[in-house]
Amino acid sequence: TKVVAGLRTDGKKPLSMIADTTTANAQVRSLGETVRLDARTKLLNPKFYEGMLASGYEGTREITKRLRNTMGWSATAGVVDNFIYEDANDVFIADEDMRKRLMDTNPNAFRDMLATFLEANGRGYWDTSEENLDRLRELYQDVEDRIEGVV
């Protein structure tokens, strides 16, 4: 939708609608509503991410992939609310026990998650505190050191 907005003379983004046919009662939602629903039912849902973590290495990669896809919606359509990144940060980064689980299960995916948060901020998709960015940078270096065998 960002590309189309750039091509239009009035600069307006087109309305993007998604047909949700995952249940018998199909619904049509805006892209923004769909992204928020997906974040609440998957990425930010404890039943989802705990299930993913229980499956081990691949589950941690799946969580990171969901966050990366969320950033993709920011890049292509600009429909991701700041709270989605903030809530994901609270769940996966601010919680020390969760960080340890992600690091122990799949340090490469955890590093990618940290990079995604930093990139989302760097591209202007996510507004967060400088203190939080410092923590993300420090964690990134810690994970990098662990992967490289420095620690």
Image (cartoon, rainbow, N blue to C red):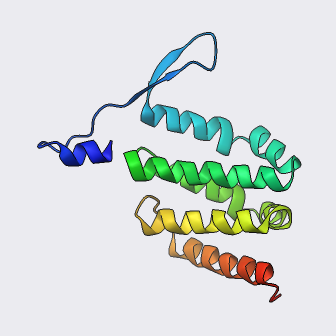
106 or 29: nearer the eye? Answer: 106
Q: Position of residue 69 (x, y in %)?
A: 56, 49
Q: What residue sits 83% from the left and 56% below the top?
A: 57
Q: Is residue 78 visible?
A: no
Q: Residue furthest top?
A: 24
Specify whether 22 is left or right of 83.
right
Please state the horizontal and vertical placement of residue 135, each as a whole percent of the image: 63, 76
The spot of residue 144 in percent (x, y) is 71, 80
* Residue 20 against residue 58 in the figure, above or below: above
Residue 117: image quadrant is bottom right
Position of 45 relative to 118 (above/below): above
* Res. 29 image quadrant: top left
Residue nearer the viewer, 64 or 7: 7
Q: Quadrant of the N terminus?
A: top left
| 125 relative to 99 in the view: left or right | left
How many badges with numbers are in the image? 0
Judged from this view, the residue extending furthest toward the bottom is 150
Q: Quadrant of residue 133?
A: bottom right
Q: Can you see residue 37? A: yes
Where residue 65 sits in the image (x, y, percent)?
64, 52
Which residue is rendered at x = 88% and y = 47% of the image?
A: 54
Q: Give the residue displayed 46% in from the left and 46% down from the top.
A: 73
Residue appearing at x 80%, y 63% in the figure: 106
Image quarter (top left, top right, bottom left or bottom right) of the C terminus: bottom right
